[in-house]
Amino acid sequence: MLVSEMDTGLRVLVVDDSDLIRRRVVEVLAGVPGVAQVSEAPGAPEARLALRDASPDVIVLDIWMPGGNGIDLLRSIKTEGRRAFVVMLTNYTHGPYRQACLDAGADAFLDKSADLGRLFAIVERLAEER
C-alpha cells in the first residue's frame, strides 16, 4: 500500500518470522480505519531496513526471529529515540520475557495465541487518537 504525502494515518511495521502470523496481522491492520501503511519484515535485518524506510508509528515485534531478537531490536528502537508505540507479540509469555520487554521499553506485551484482538484494539485506539 502506498502512502501519499498528504496522508496522516498511522504507519505500522509488523516483524514476525512466521509468514502465516505476519501476513494475517498485516491483512487485518491494513483494514483498520486510520492506518495508512502496514509494512512487514520476517527478521531483524529486514526490520532495521524497514525502520529506516517506513518510519513507523507502531511497531509489532516477535521475540525470536532470524538475524537477531525482538528484545535487542526493541532496545535499539528506544535508545534511538523513536517515538513509536512498540507492541511485543509473542508466544514466549513467561515472566522473564515479559519483564525483559517491559524493562526495555515495550508499550504493550501480548500473547500471540490469545491477544490478537487486543493488538487490533490498540492500533484502532492509536489511529483514533492521531
Image: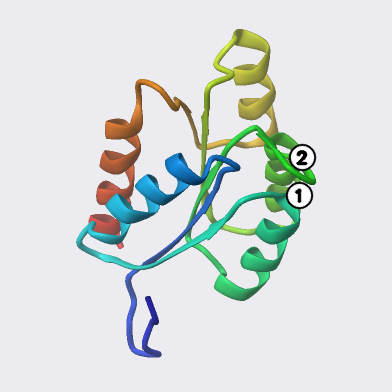
Quick one: which residue is furthest to the front in this view?
A: 20
x%, y% of residue 109? 50, 28
- Name the residue at 31% across, 63% down: 130
Quadrant of the rendered structure where residue 61 is? top right
Q: Which residue was labeled with disc 1?
A: 76
The total of numbered circles placed on residues is 2
Q: Residues within 10 Å of mark 2 (few under 14, many from 20)?
A: some
x%, y% of residue 20? 44, 42
As measured in the structure, the alpha-carbon distance from the residue carrying label 1 to the one carrying label 2 is: 6 Å
**Callout 2: SS:** helix
The quadrant of the rendering that contains the N terminus is bottom left
Q: Which residue was labeled with disc 2?
A: 72
Amino acid carrying label 1: it is Ser
Colour scheme of the rendered structure: rainbow
- Name the residue at 62% across, 66% down: 50
x%, y% of residue 127? 28, 58
Q: Which mark is residue 108?
A: none
On the rendered structure, is 115 left or right of 84?
Answer: left
Q: Residues within 10 Å of mark 1 (few under 14, many from 20)?
A: some
In the rendered image, the vertical position of residue 1 relative to residue 119, given as above or below? below
Asked if marks 1 and 2 touch (Cβ < 8 Å), the reply is yes
Amino acid carrying label 2: it is Asp
Quick one: which residue is furthest to the bottom in this view?
A: 5
**Callout 1: SS:** helix
x%, y% of residue 9? 32, 70
In the rendered image, the vertical position of residue 4 relative to residue 78, given as above or below? below
- Name the residue at 72% across, 45% down: 73
Quick one: which residue is furthest to the top in this view?
A: 95
